[in-house]
Image: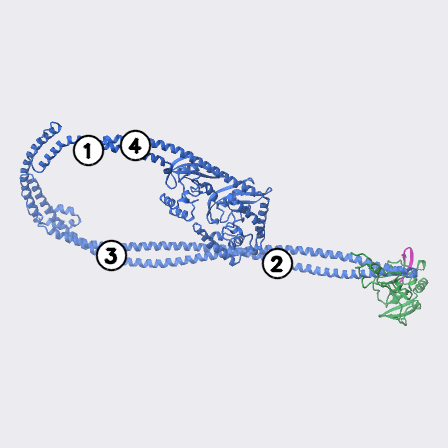
Amino acid sequence: MDLQPKAPPSLPEAAHEWRSPVAALTRFRGVTPDSGLPLVSASPQQAEERWAVPVADYWLMVAPELGCELVEWSTPCRIPNTPGWMRGVTNVRGTLVPIFDLHPLLAEAGKKADGKPMLFVLGEGEQAGALVVNGLPYRQRLDSRLAPTTPPELPEPLAARVKSAYRHNGEWLLDCDLTGALRDLGTLAAAV
Amino acid sequence: MKLRHKLLLGSSLLAVLPVLVTGGLVSGLSTNLAEQSLVDQTREQLTTIAELKGEQLTEYFGYVERQIRAYSEDPELVTAMRAMLAGYQGMSGDSIALNSEQQQALGSYYTDGFVRELRRRGGEPVQMDTPLAALGDRARALQYHYISANPSPAGFRQELNAAADGSTYSEAHAQHHPRIRDFMESAARSGGYEDLMFIDADSGTVIYSVGKNLELGTSLAEGPYADSALGDVFRRAANAPSPDDVVFTDFQSYLPAFAAPSAFMATPVHDGTERVGVMAVRLSDARINEIMTSRAAWRRVGLRETGETYLVGGDGTLRNNSRFLVEQAPDYLAALRQAGVSTAVVDRIEASNNGVLLQPVETRAAQAALAGRRGFAREPDYRNEPVFTSYAPFAVGDVNWGLIAQFDESEALSPVVALRDSVLAGSAAVGLMLLVLGGGAGWLFTRTVVRPVHHLESTVRQIAAGDDKARANMTTGDELQTLGDAFDSLLDERIAQYEEAARENEHLNNSIIDLLRAVSQLSQHDLTVKVPVTEDVTGPVADALNQMVSEIGDLLNDASLVAERVGLASRRLKLQADKVRQMALEEGSEVDAMAAELDAAAQTMAEIAELAERCDRTAAQASETTGTALETVNGTVQGMSLIRELVHETEKRIKRLGERSQEISGIVDIINTIAERTHVLALNASMQAAAAGEAGRGFAVVADEVQRLAESSRNATSQISGLVHNIQVETADTITTMGRTISEVVEGSRMAERAGEQMQQTRATTIELVAAVKEIANGSQRQSATSLTLQQKAANVQLSTQKTRQRLEEQTVQTKALVLNSNNLLESIRAFRLPERKHNEADEQQEPRAIAGGNHARSSST
């Protein structure tokens, strides 16, 4: 077998510095990449991207630079005398993180959540808070294909934190300040 | 013979006899001495020749035994025998079945080709249907491909390397046959081999032969040739205690080789300690013929013109050809016929030009040699010719033969005959000379004696001619003169007595003439005549004659009366006989009618018996067919059971496959979980990278790729999960189907078993039916036999009636003859002129009793 390295495929100039793992692993002759895998690295314009998190009937979009984490669901420790959307606190690598469940607030009455529940943790340390999500988040690019529209009616304090709303493939995409919303909910829960 | 001749002969004999006696004695003594010397010489010569032939035979059989033992230990032969055996055992099923055309070709060879060749070689015709019917499927296949369809004729069939039947047997045959054939052909000249065979030790089947004769494929344990010499040698070799044992059987007529005289040698073949089979070779009589006939060079080995050596087997026949069959066949065959050998045997010897196993040798020398004795004898041989014989026993293994060397006595003693003839010729010449001299002296002596005798003879002739006065009056002065005087005195006395007797005789003649006249009148049926009684010797005769005539007259009167009564009784008897004859005729008609009806009944019974016998055969065939069907059903039941076990096994395997798919499903779930977690991890990495800004850009790329890979893994596991699910569903369906199949198989097995039980019941019923039909057939045959017996008895009665009728006819004729004879008797008696009968009342009253008892009536009348 001839193991001489073959000439790399012509790549964009921006990708010369970094070669994607797929391109790096398939640069030898006789190995063909899967057509479904990218040959180039992601675009550097990630500032225009958001993490879209499924909560009830909406996709809540969060800025990537916030620092967030997805954690397996574990039964939280309830906090007495708190509302129902305050599910309690849980231990995330030694830090107690409050858990907020927006499903009762955003879903239609009586509608149960679909999918496996997970925790979407925002922030770090004492500033961290977790949101119960019903699926895995994905990255959503904010380009010209998404046109802003009037946001739907949402309960407070979430309605105040929505910066813009988009309608895409029949789904609601809400670009919001989720950190602020969680802070508001914490304050609200503490006031009860 | 006259006195002169006697005297002359006597004197000659006195001269010749001493010479002849002396010559005879000298001839006898010299002949005996010479003969004794020649006999001793012949004994030594024949004994030496017999011992030489015995040594040659011992050397030959020892060579054959060593060669067979060595070849049986050849590893290549063991390999060949194993391959042939495996190929033979692999012949089964439809692959070896012959079609109808092939079956017909094989049958045609048995009943036509083989029999024609057998007849051409001088064998007696035999029925080959039984050996053909005894062949199994494998034997039929082998014999068709290697004998019937062999392009080479008998004697050259070894040229075929393999048949084109595609069997494993033919593959093994093609591989090993050429080498075995080459060995046998190279060894045949020195060993006298005709064929070499491999025999399965377990079944006794002849699985291979070089020459391809009719024993190929047959079992020597129970096949058509189990009782042949080959079967005997196989059993002894198979049971031989040692691998080195070589067994031998005597020559016999061997049918598969066209009844040629054949002997066999065999030895077990071992592979290590395992007994693979038996190897046997067939020996012809050619090599023994060469040794015993010295290759037709009898004179060169000192057997002169009539000498020969031969072997006699335990059955009393030759083991090699006679010299006379080779050199003087017509005279030899004629001598055999004159010696009392059956015409059939002589014809077979002439047709085959071979006397082995045919020519009987029942001499005392042969019997003594077979009994283990050796010696020398002078006796007639098998041609009934006197010979000198030296005999000795000869043994090959367990087989005992008699070894004979002989000369014709005429040839051996020919010098003695010449010596005797010369001595007798010399004696005859001397005797002749003495005969002439003795004859002259005897003639002179005879003259002095014969002259007076002639004078005496002349005198007797004169007296015989009627000259009563002639006398001898001899004057020689010796005993002859005394004899002549006595003769003269005797003549004088006898002539005087003769004249006196003539006178008395004339007187007696007159009396006899009177007597004859009276008898002449009596002969005219006149019993009233009285013969005159004289005083001479005829007087008592005349008186007795008169008395006899009177008695005869009375007797004839009584006879006349009895004849009348016999005539009356004969007529009554004739009437009675006529009535009896009429009754016999009527009875004969009745018996004829009864015999005809019995014939018809017997014919009907015979038809019934034949019908019953056909029924018996048909029922037996039905029983056989039922048996075959039962075997088929039993095979079906076993097959169904096997199928059921296989289906069970398949179901187990499919269940295990389902269990494995469950395990796969669990593993896929684990992989899916790992993929999901990997996805979450990748998401977290992307989030961390994004949070790190420009510093996490490279890490974000890796996180994206990990995320994509996790997504691909999830998709793949999802597809695998779907496939596994489909497999589980289809496995469950398959198990359900298998369950139904098992149920069907169980039901089929149960039905087959029921069919088997019903077939068994049918078979039992058929067997009972066969027995009943057989009983009917037997009863019908007995009844038919009884009818035949009854028919025979009726025929006997008919015959007896006919004989009775004939007897009655004869009785009637005889009765008629009796009546006629009684009339003739009466007429004959009435022809006599009888004296008056004394007729009174007492005679009339006695008449009825006279009819019943003639003696009493005669005494009454007297």
User: In the rendered image, which quarter contains the N terminus of chain B?
Assistant: top left
Which lettered chain is shown in green?
A: A
Q: State the extent of the magenta-drawn residues as a range.
A: A90-103
Residue A117 is situated, as x and y percent measured from the top left of the image, at 85, 61
Discs 2 and 3 lie in a common subunit: yes
Separation (CA) of disc 3 from disc 1: 81 Å
Amino acid at pointer 3? Arg
Location of residue B476 with respect to B294 vertically, above or below: above
Helix, strand or loop at label 4? It is helix
Helix, strand or loop at label 2? It is helix
**Which of pointers 3 and 1 indicates the residue nearer the eye?**
1
Q: Which residue is mark 4?
A: B24
Residue B611 sits in quarter? bottom left
Q: Which residue is mark 3?
A: B581
Discs 2 and 1 lie in a common subunit: yes
Discs 3 and 1 lie in a common subunit: yes
Q: Give the chain of mark 1.
A: B
Q: Which residue is mark 2?
A: B747
Q: Which residue is mark 1?
A: B6
Separation (CA) of disc 2 from disc 4: 114 Å
**Dominant secondary structure, magenta:** strand
Sequence-wise first label, 3 or 4: 4
| Residue A94 colored in magenta in the image | yes
